[in-house]
Amino acid sequence: MTNAQKWVAAFLGFFLILFLLGRITRKEEPTMPSTMGQMGQQTTQTTSDADGQTLTKQLGCISCHGENLQGTQMAPALENISKNWTRDGLINYLRNPSSYSGGARFDEYREKYKSTIMPSYGNRDVKELGRIAEFLLTK
């Protein structure tokens, strides 16, 4: 075995040990707390059955678009968007915002909000995106 092979083997062995130590000492993620519902039954609101307003907060929309989605220096307002979007169009946009690069409105947004990129929610359930779209279109 050459010196280079010995170093590579030692290097890989070291990272294998670090990986195993990380797995052993990893802390479990806390679960979502449950709340007490009517008649003492425990209920939890998961993202799959949350309303659009709750989902916008859970996804972090308010961190860029503002607490009431009125817009900030980071992102535009999400009020009165029904004049530019349909439900299906908005769902498609949320799934892949980078595919909507044309048009004067998007050029204006890109110029005004240079340091912000709209994240893609293509990994989210379409039903959740539908509830978000319905909520936003009624604002």
Image (cartoon, rainbow, N blue to C red):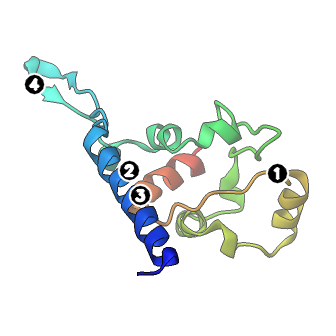
Classify the position of the N terminus by image quarter: bottom left
Q: Which of marks 4 and 2 is in front?
A: 2
Mark 2 crowd level (few <14, some 14–19, many ≥20, 10 Å Cα): few
Disc on the earlier residue, 4 or 1:
4
Seen at 78% across and 43% down, the residue is 74
Marks 2,1: beta carbons within 8 A: no
Q: Which residue is denoted by mark 4 in the rendering?
A: 41
Q: Quadrant of residue 95?
A: bottom right
Q: Which amino acid does label 1 sit on?
A: Ser
Left or right, residue 106 beside residue 40: right
Q: In which quarter of the image is residue 77?
A: top right
Label 1 to label 3: alpha-carbon separation: 36 Å
Q: Which residue is denoted by mark 3 in the rendering?
A: 15
Disc on the earlier residue, 4 or 2:
2
Q: Which amino acid does label 4 sit on?
A: Gln
Residue 86 at x, y percent in the picture:
59, 65
Marks 3,2: beta carbons within 8 A: yes
Q: Which of marks 1 and 3 is in front?
A: 3
Q: Is mark 4 on a helix, strand or loop?
A: loop
Label 3 to label 2: alpha-carbon separation: 5 Å
Tell me how many marks there are.
Answer: 4
Q: Residue 18 carries which label?
A: 2
Mark 4 crowd level (few <14, some 14–19, many ≥20, 10 Å Cα): few
Label 4 to label 2: alpha-carbon separation: 44 Å
Disc on the earlier residue, 3 or 4:
3
| Rendered position, 122 above or below 37 | below
Q: What residue type is labelled 2?
A: Leu
